[in-house]
Amino acid sequence: MKKVAVIICLLVIALSAACAEDVLLEQNFDNGFPDGWLSIDNDGDGKEWKISTGASGNNNTKCILSASYDGGVLNPDNWLITPQVTLATSNVLSYLVAIHNTSYPAEHYGVYISETGTEVADFELLFEETMTAKNNQKSPGEFSLRTIVIPESYNNKSVYMAIRHFNCSGQDKLKIDDLVLASGLSVEENNFVNPKSVELLGNYPNPFNPNTIISFKLNNTETINLSVFNAKGQLVEELINSKLNRGVHKVSFKATNLNSGVYYYKLEAEGLRMTKKMLLIK
Ligand SMILES: [Ca+2]
Ligand SMILES: [Ca+2]
């Protein structure tokens, strides 16, 4: 009997360890601009991330808002940066996101990560999307849940996360609320909504010379564009611009006539845009 009790006890400990969920950072923005966070007005128009009231769809509590429109400068570049957080394993960032209304219906933003510091140039893009009332929201102003699985290469590293409102007409507002960075989570077990109908899986080999294979996964039949850009952001080659069936696709990229250096490949589908970096060494 005693032996059984010990085994059950050990089993409970093992199970709870396997499912250990640690909240590393949690912010509801209800008590003013939080200590240790940064807002960077990178376009310099005086508009940046600020606490806002009346967060419709969120019980009218406060959220944080990048408001860019003042009848003047468009195209915002506003960064919201978290305090430094030490990640564990199976790290997941979740947050609520909303646009203000349907009059100016396309707000673009990205989720970034940095191991080095809080300068804009320190950050690497993890995920970006264009929010529209049509394809991302139940109704204008209503928040949608997003969940970003942080790549394993960042496990156990100390990082900063950033949300950047940019690269859009900038005529309206992007809202974020209830941001949670947690470890030890299984996305499936927690019923998170995975916004990705498209996943950019990476390229192999990387670094490469002169050939590499870029892989991506479509969860639906999608019209996609896959293009390669140089470090200056100039288009090098359009690899695909067509409708493809669901499944994993692999595309070969040949850099025979290119110089050594950093290149980017960008996968675009409806409302989604993902970019990864690759290195050509000759
Ligand atoms: Ca809130
Ligand atoms: Ca600004």
Image: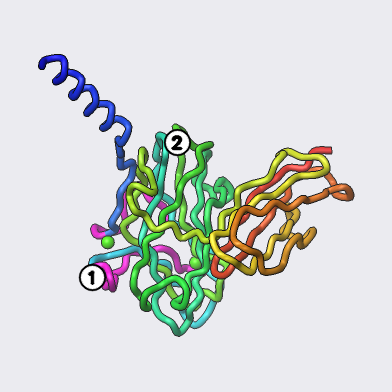
Image x and y of residue 199, in percent? 56, 54
Disc 1 element: loop
Q: Residue at x 60, y 53 (%)?
A: 200
Outermost residue toward the right in this view? 257
Image x and y of residue 264, in percent? 69, 52
Q: Residue at x 56, y 72 (%)?
A: 168
Does the segment drawn in magenta span residue 266?
no
* Mark seen at residue 158: 2
Task: Evaluate whether residue 43 shows in this view.
Answer: no
Pick the front one: 201 or 53: 201
Pick the front one: 121 or 225: 225
Q: Are marks 2 and 1 in contact (CB under 8 Å)?
A: no
- Which quadrant is the C terminus positioned in? top right
Pick the front one: 45 or 61: 61
> How many neighbours does mark 2 have within 10 angstroms: few (below 14), some (14-19), or many (20 or more)?
some
The verdict on label 2 being within 8 Å of ligand 1 is: no
Residue marked by disc 1: 60
Disc 2 element: strand
The verdict on label 1 being within 8 Å of ligand 1 is: no
Relative to 13, say whether 114 is above or below: below
Magenta span dominant secondary structure: loop
Q: Which stretch appears magenta?
A: 30-59
Q: Amino acid at mark 1?
A: Asn
Left/right of residue 244 with respect to residue 196 in the rendered view: right
